Amino acid sequence: MSLNASDIARIASLARLDLAADESERMLGQINGFFELVERMRAVDTARVEPLAHPVATLRDVSLRLADDVASEPNQREANQRSAPAVERGLFLVPKVIE
């Protein structure tokens, strides 16, 4: 698949972009380059390739680098709710905005 100048003009119009002629030509080259890359990727036979859980899983054991889920601040609910206009059983009360 490849686009032509009128396709770029239509896309620019739909996106409400005012492209100069040189910008339009540059966009045409970039988009067609993207489509060429996609076509080359589609041409690769991946029928017998097992999906990976992570892109670098074949290089080394991948472990999640997440911090431990530990409370680091003291519970200050009552202090934080003192200035609230309405509180009930530890919850902020807000006006109903959707009927």
Image (tube, rainbow, N blue to C red):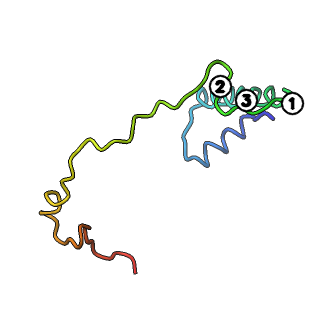
Place residue 60 in its image quadrant.
Answer: top right
Along the polypeptide, which appears first: circle 3 or circle 2?
Answer: 3
In the displayed structure, 15 sits above or below 66; it is: below
- Measured as percent of width and height from the top left, residue 33 is found at 71, 26
Query: Circle 1 is placed at which residue position?
Result: 48
Q: Nearer the viewer, residue 41 or 15?
A: 41
How packed mark 1 is, by other alpha carbons closer than 10 Å (few <14, some 14-19, many 20 or more), is: few
Q: On screen, 35 above or below 80?
A: above
Specify few, some or many for label 3: CA neighbours under 10 Å numbering under 14, 14-19, or 20 or more. some
Q: Amino acid at mark 2?
A: Ala
Is residue 50 depicted above or below 18 in this figure?
A: above
| Label 3 – label 1 distance at C-alpha | 29 Å
Badge nearest the viewer, 2 or 1: 2
Residue drawn 70% across the image and 29% down it: 34
Helix, strand or loop under label 3: helix
Q: Amino acid at mark 1?
A: Arg
Q: Secondary structure at mark 2?
A: loop
Disc on res. 91 = none
Residue under pointer 3: 32
Location of residue 81 (image quadrant): bottom left
Residue named by callout 2:
57
